Amino acid sequence: MDSDFSLLIKYISHPLTVEERERVLQWRSLSPENELLFSEICKLRLLNEYSQRNTVAETAQAMMRIKTKIHHKTLICRLKNISKYAALVLLLVSLSIFGWKQMSAGKYTTICVTENESVKKVQFADGSTVWLSTASELHIPHSFSPTHREVSLIGRGFFEIKKDVNNPFTITGKHINIKVTGTTFDLKIDQKEKNVEAILVSGKIVLQDNNRNDIYQMNPGEKLFYNSGNKQYVVKSVDTSTLTAWHLDQTIYDNTTLREIVNKLADIYHININIQSAKLAERRFKLIINKEESLIDILNNIKYLTPLEYKIEGNEVFLTEQTVK
């Protein structure tokens, strides 16, 4: 992976293009050794101060300090085993030492969901659960327990938190915190844009700044959008079941035209879907589609909801209104 070596370094502090992520993920799957290195890179991306404090000079100093310690037998053996990537390991260890000095305490476990992966379910020690979305990362301290409930999130997660008013559950981001007592909610943290989106299904959550000062207490059925750059937020009422269905690998269409639905199906199943008339195309549906359902299952569900017929010919699907006999 010599030609792609720089992508691993770029991944630590900068977003990759879809093509670049594909190259990294292909490399990652080649061996357990690559998987281990990729896991270390994911951990580095979660260091709170890395993107602001890392400089060429500081990295160089960290690398020099590591070079003086390479005589340790265990480290030498490990470097020999992965000699092809010795330069990368040296840089990762250097950055790890630098990064951990910036963090307040403790060791962490990082769970990453790549762009090619589906929803990943994680169970916490206190009985709480989170479903992580694509391209998301969850940072869990080893000290996590029913009395010390704090994690950090990059990306999107759907949380079901076990109620404990004496030990609130806290989710931290680079610019914001979410305080939870016992609640079901959807949370999306975009560190690059400094944006937070939260959808509260049940219970109570409180949006807090980095100093743990309360900003807004949400009510069930609300969606909140907050920008930490200008410290402004917008709240509106929404259909929570529709907006949070992703964590069950479901897509919910609510008052959606047949044209919109089949356009989505055409992208998913890589086929062409033809609708007989504009009137039929504009007919609206409320439809729940599960990820494991086949195209025929979905077409039969639509057929059950409205009088239409479908015909499949190779890569083409034809939808027509059912004739009355």
Image (cartoon, grey):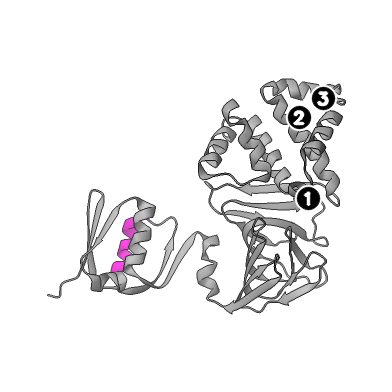
- Residue at image position (80%, 50%) is 142
The stretch in magenta equals 294-303
User: For residue 287, what is the image quadrant?
Assistant: bottom left
Classed neighbour count for the residue bearing mark 2: other residues with Cα under 10 Å, few (<14), some (14–19), many (≥20): some
The mark that comes first in sequence, 3 or 1, is 1
Which of the 4 image quadrants contains residue 8? Answer: top right
| Res 124 seen here | no
Residue 274 picture location, percent across and down: 24, 60
The residue at 66%/69% (across/down) is 226
Q: Residue at x 61, y 36 (%)?
A: 7
State which tag comes first along the sequence, 3 or 2: 3
Residue receiving disc 1:
49
Identify the residue position indicated by label 2 in the image.
90
Q: Is residue 220 left or right of residue 151?
A: left
In reply to whether residue 89 is colored magenta, the answer given is no
Marks 2 and 1 sit apart, C-alpha to C-alpha, by 20 Å
Residue 222: percent from left, percent from top: 61, 77
**Apparent side of residue 69 relative to residue 162 in the rendered image (left or right):** right
Task: Give the residue pinned by disc 3.
Answer: 74
- Is 120 above or below relative to 72? below
Q: Is residue 255 above or below residue 53?
A: below
Q: Report the front residue among 158 and 27.
A: 27
Crowding at label 1, few (<14), some or many (≥20) Cα neighbours within 10 Å? some
Residue shown at 73% from the left, 20% from the top: 80
Badge 2 amino acid:
Leu
Picture layout, residue 218 above or below residue 265: below
Which residue lies most toward the left here? 325
For the residues carrying marks 3 and 1, which lies nearer the camera in this image?
A: 1
Query: Is disc 1 placed on a helix, strand or loop?
Result: loop
> Disc 3 to disc 1, how far (Cα)?
30 Å
The local secondary structure at tag 3 comes to: helix
Pointer 3 and pointer 1: residues touching (CB < 8 Å)?
A: no
